[in-house]
Amino acid sequence: MPWSPHRPSELERKVETLSLKLLQANAALGLKTVYAERLEYLLHQRSERIDELTGVIDSLRSANQKLGLENHCLTALLVASPGRRDNGQAVPTVNAESPH
């Protein structure tokens, strides 16, 4: 007996329509999942870079404080010995007061 095509019933059409919608929703969900995973990866990289740069900033601040202290000590030495000469040249003195 040969197969005879028949018109799909309303229920069969609804099943087919819902199957297509489900496939589309699954595809969209897959894309959004990949997108979210990529964002998480980029956030992780960004956080690592921020931590790295924070360490560099802390190191530079420490070095800057050390240089500031050294500058202060050398300035105090210069102020304490005004008029001292090195190689026949007068060493400039530093005025502790700021000119206004």
Image (tube, rainbow, N blue to C red):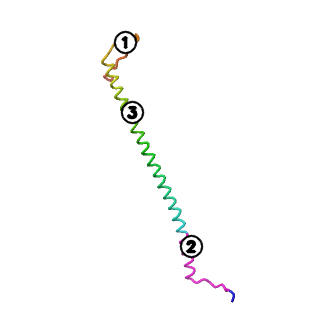
Q: Secondary structure at mark 1?
A: strand
Give the spatial CA distance, label 2 vs label 1. 94 Å
Give the spatial CA distance, label 2 vs label 3. 65 Å
Q: Secondary structure at mark 3?
A: helix
Q: Where is residue 20 shown, x and y percent of the image?
A: 56, 73
Q: Earlier in the sequence, mark 2 or mark 3?
A: 2
Q: Amino acid under label 2? A: Leu
Q: Specify whether residue 26 is in view.
A: yes
The residue indicated by pointer 1 is: 85
Q: Where is residue 81 shown, x and y percent of the image?
A: 31, 16
Whether tag 2 and tag 3 are in contact, CB under 8 A, the answer is no
Residue depicted at x 46% and y 49%: 46
The residue indicated by pointer 3 is: 63
Q: Earlier in the sequence, mark 3 or mark 1?
A: 3
Q: Amino acid under label 3? A: Ala
Number of callouts: 3
Q: Secondary structure at mark 2?
A: helix
The residue indicated by pointer 2 is: 20
Q: Residue furthest right?
A: 2
Our reading of the magenta stretch's main secondary structure is: helix
User: Is residue 32 found left or right of 65 in the rendered image?
Assistant: right
- The boundaries of the magenta stretch are 3-23
**28, above or below 79, in the image:** below
